[in-house]
Amino acid sequence: MAVSMTTRRFEELVADALDEVPREFAEAMDNVVVLVEERNEEEPEILGLYHGVALTERSHDYGGVLPDRISIYREPILAICDTEDDVVEEVLVTVVHEIAHHFGIDDARLHELGWG
């Protein structure tokens, strides 16, 4: 059964998840913003999405571009969770998963590491 949660509370959980990112990784993130959105219109079931150019793919001519975006989708996450504790865990996994894409780690490697 889906969890009911205000947008504000969900945003707090995303902020808490970002606080869990080790400092060296947080400091290495470059030109990226994390947003909470209700859902992805094109793929309504996905939990998060990284939009941008991974750090590993940036070259000397990277610059003057809008920030990369990490979107965390509230409705699909709430839909697959039964408790607030489940939401906390799923938000953390989703945030880490999308940050990993910013660092150039692909889905296959994330699944191997348990961050599917």
Image (cartoon, rainbow, N blue to C red):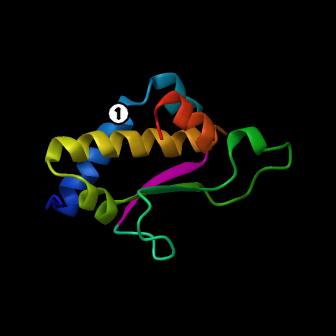
Residue 116 in percent (x, y) is at 48, 41
Q: Residues within 10 Å of mark 1 (few under 14, many from 20)?
A: few
Look at mark 1 in the image and give the residue it sits on: 19
Residue 32 in percent (x, y) is at 56, 49
Which residue shows up at 15% across the image and 47% down it? 84
Q: Give the range drawn in magenta.
A: 29-37
Mark 1 belongs to which amino acid? Asp
Residue 59 in percent (x, y) is at 83, 43
Asked which secondary structure carries label 1, the reply is helix
Disc tally is 1
The one nearer the camera, 44 or 8, is 44
Residue farthest toward the right in the current orientation of the protein: 60
Residue 75 in percent (x, y) is at 29, 65
Image quadrant for the N terminus?
bottom left
The secondary structure that dominates the magenta segment is strand
Left or right, residue 13 beside residue 46: left
Left or right, residue 90 beside residue 56: left
Residue 10, picture quadrant: bottom left
In reply to whether residue 9 is colored magenta, the answer given is no
Which residue shows up at 33% across the image and 62% down it? 76
In reply to whether residue 35 is colored magenta, the answer given is yes
Residue farthest toward the bottom in the current orientation of the protein: 41
Residue 16, picture quadrant: top left
Which residue shows up at 45% across the image and 38% down it? 96
